[in-house]
Every structure is written in structure tokens, then in C-alpha cells.
Amino acid sequence: MENKILFFDTKPYDKKSFEESNEPFHYEITYLKTHLNQETAKFASGYPSVCAFVNDEIDASVIRILKQEGVKLIALRSAGYNNVDLKAAYDNRLHVVRVPGYSPHAVAEHAVALMLTLNRKTHKAYFRTRDGNFSINGLLGFDMHRKTAGVVGTGQIGLCLINILRGMGMEILVYDPYPNKILEGKEGVSYVDLPELYRRSDVISLHCPLTTATHHMIQEKSIAQMKDGVMLINTGRGKLIKTTALISGLKQGKIGSAGLDVYEEEHEYFFEDFSSSLISDDLLARLLTFPNVLITSHQGFFTREALANIADTTLRNISAFLKGEFMENEICYRCGNVCRKKQGKRCF
């Protein structure tokens, strides 16, 4: 009974990676394609643990249903948890665990891929040559070498990105309310405040969590402070950017290009196939019309190594819970975003 896990929003690659990682654990896993929401939460009856992803709706009403159905643990197979009502989980005595660091290299490398593609327009060149058009007119880029990159957030992903960009000979400006000691004294890296980062950066890349302080941190006022023609990259969280402000900045030419692996209303579209359907989200549809905007469908994490790490960490989180062990990856409303309980004692 205790070894049963119900998966929501399962894709073929999820099942493959978890089946491989499950061999030493021998959990009985049921995979559902449907999202976790108020209508599907009742499917969790008889499952002490459920596994959810970033686009599942885990609000107070869903948590109450999960509690009623006997669920004790919500295991997120993601780093982000802004889709979870942590207070409701705490009030209902449900534990929530996550995967804080599955592959920072994967996301950082994807951010660089967006930068280079937008700069050198390799996506456009690909389609040209496929059609027999070998003209390079309109594909002009710029040297990344000696340009200035602004990196917002210096966690594991930010650190990986900084190392890559330093290797390309870029000057790095960084902002984080909690400076990383690893970066202190590194040549070509300077901590600055956000206005200076906006003002001096040729390329800005976002790698910070979504909080009340960072929600819509990129909006009309911040965009106005940026260099004309700045390149904006977001592989963090969609709601870091106010989409209407981004579109306005693109129309005015203030933003020269934008690479987005996330979008503030992505839960309606990302990870799904709408190639034969109408996109009713006017803002997303508008973004897709800009020739200087490159959107990928939240695939920054999508490497073999990352999927293996996600599966392994998720199953280890569940194992720690079932054994009554200290869960280092628990998220707790009472303790803060990530539990820092003393002597390995839970809050409840």
C-alpha cells in the first residue's frame, strides 16, 4: 500500500526515465496523462504519494481533496513550486518535496543556445538553405566577445551560465540579493544593482526564482532602463516578465531580441501539441509573430542527464518520507521555502 505512487501529467520520456530509476526501489507506479487539478485529484484515492509537475494545479481545493483521499506526500519532479499552495499543504499536514538541482548545466546551456541562435540567426539560415536560398542578407550578428552580459540570479544555473559566458570573453554583471561567495574575486565578474545591470548589459539572462519580489520584475520601468536593442533571455519562470511590456518593448525596438523558454501563461500550452489547433492566447500568438523572438516550450531541462537526476531524486525523496528520514528537499510553509529544520525533525 505505502509503495504506491500516482503520477500526473506523464509524458513518454517521464515514464521511461522513472522506470529505469525505479529498479532498486520497486515502487508500484501508476502513470496518468491528465493534469492534477480539482477534477482529477480524486484519482489519488488509495495512493499515499502523488507525483506532479510544473503545470499541475495544486491549490487549496486540490490539496483538500488529496488529503481526503489519503495522500500524505506531494512529490514535485521539478525545482519550481509556485503552483503549490504551501500554506494549504501545511495546514492539511501534507508534505511537499521537490528536485532543487537536476542539471544546472542543461538550463545554462539552453540559455546560451537561445543567445547564439538569436544573434547569428541560425534558425533562419537553416530554413533558407533547405529552400535552396544561400543568401546571407539579413543574418548579420555581432561578436559576443567583449560584450556585457547581465545575469540575474547566481544559484547553480547562474553560476554555470557565468562560466560559459566568461569562456566566450564576455564581461559579466550579476545581481542577486544573496551574493555567491564563489564569484567573489573572479576576473570579469561584478555584482551590481539591478538598474546598473539593466543600463550596461547587451544581453540579460534571468535565472532567479519566482517570488512576490521578482514577479514581473521585467516590466515597463525596467525595460526603459535597458540599452536600446538589448537581448533578453528567460529560462527561469514565465511570470518574471510582464508580457504586455515585453511586446511593447519589442515594437518600439527597445528590446532587440528575446529568447523565451518560459511564458507567464504557459500551463495552457507548453508540453502539449497545438499544431492542428488555434492558439487562443492573444499575447502568445502575438509573440510568435515577431521575427526577433525565439520561443521554446520549457525544454531547458530536457537532457538525458537531467531526466535521470529528476527521477532518481524524486524517488529518493519519496523513500526518505516513507522511512521517516529527514527530507532535505522538503518545502515547508512554516520553515520558509525550503525546510531548515534542526536535528532532522519535521515541523509536523
Image (cartoon, helix red, strand yellow):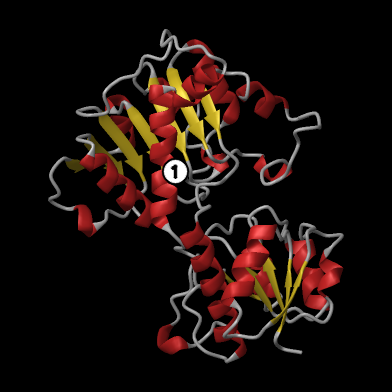
Crowding near the residue tagged with mark 1, few <14, some 14–19, many ≥20 C-alpha atoms within 10 Å: some
Q: Position of residue 325 (x, y in %)?
A: 52, 89
Q: Between residue 93 and residue 48, name the one nearer to us.
A: 48
Residue 335 position (above or below residue 257): below
Q: Between residue 303 and residue 108, name the one nearer to us.
A: 303
In the rendered image, the quadrant that contains the N terminus is: bottom right
- Residue at (41% x, 84% y) in the render: 342
Q: Between residue 267 and residue 85, name the one nearer to us.
A: 267
- Residue at (57% x, 91% y) in the render: 324
Q: Position of residue 64 (x, y in %)?
A: 79, 70
Question: Element at badge 1?
Answer: helix
Q: Which residue lies under the disc numbered 1? A: 110
Q: Position of residue 96 (x, y in %)?
A: 61, 72
Position of residue 161 in the picture relative to residue 57 (left or right): left
Position of residue 324 in the picture relative to residue 60 (left or right): left
Q: Between residue 249 and residue 156, name the one nearer to us.
A: 156
* Quarter-of-image position of residue 274: top right
* Quarter-of-image position of residue 138: top left
Position of residue 156 in the picture relative to residue 17 (left or right): left
In the rendered image, the quadrant that contains the C terminus is: bottom right
Q: Amino acid at mark 1?
A: His
- Residue at (36% x, 55% y) in the render: 155
